[in-house]
Amino acid sequence: MAEANNQASTVEWAKQKYNEQYENWMPWIEDTFLKYFTKDNKASYSTKEQLDKTKVTGVDQVDTLQDSVHSTVAGQVGQGGLLQPVGDLVSKEGINRTERQGKDDQGGYLPTSVPGLSGLTK
């Protein structure tokens, strides 16, 4: 009986560690993929994805026009866009923190880039 309980606790420990590593690494992997294989960051990718859901017609010409407008709008917060710094900030401090239940990539809740908060981050 004790051995079965020990195996169950080992499995639970392994699940917990897996979830912790997934929470730490997956946002970084997604960011890296988007950076090297697309012209998006998470903010522009999410924007484009949401705008694609708003197509109003089934007419090919209108859908093509909407796709172009959506790409232009989303591209402004993506790599090389006018609002890229905003998109990068939203990606890092908004979307990634949401994926990590409010924590940053260091595991703290307060931004480490703000002077004077470095001792309060964990």
Image (cartoon, rainbow, N blue to C red):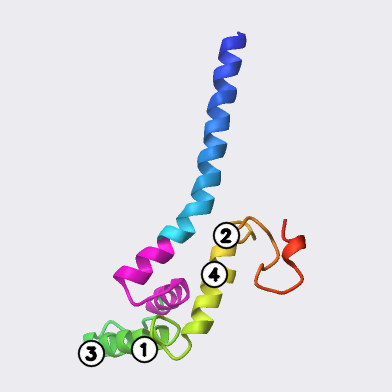
Residue 117 at what x, y percent from top left?
Answer: 75, 68
On the rendered image, what quadrant is the C terminus found in? bottom right
Q: Is residue 85 left or right of residue 102?
A: left
Residue 31 at what x, y percent from top left?
Answer: 43, 65
Residue ID at (36%, 89%): 72
Spatial separation of the CA atoms under disc 2 and disc 4 = 9 Å
In the rendered image, which residue does mark 4 sit on? 92
On the rendered image, what quadrant is the N terminus found in? top right
Residue ID at (30%, 88%): 68
Dot 3: element: helix
In the rendered image, which residue does mark 2 sit on? 105
Spatial separation of the CA atoms under disc 2 and disc 3 = 43 Å
Spatial separation of the CA atoms under disc 1 and disc 3 = 17 Å
Spatial separation of the CA atoms under disc 4 and disc 3 = 36 Å
Residue 69 at what x, y percent from top left?
Answer: 35, 90
Question: What amino acid does circle 1 point to?
Answer: Thr
In the rendered image, which residue does mark 1 sit on? 72
Of the two numbered discs 1 and 3 on the same chain, state the one appearing first in sequence. 3
In the rendered image, which residue does mark 3 sit on? 61
Of the two numbered discs 2 and 4 on the same chain, state the one appearing first in sequence. 4
Of the two numbered discs 2 and 3 on the same chain, state the one appearing first in sequence. 3
Question: What amino acid does circle 4 point to?
Answer: Lys
Which region of the structure is painted magenta? 30-52
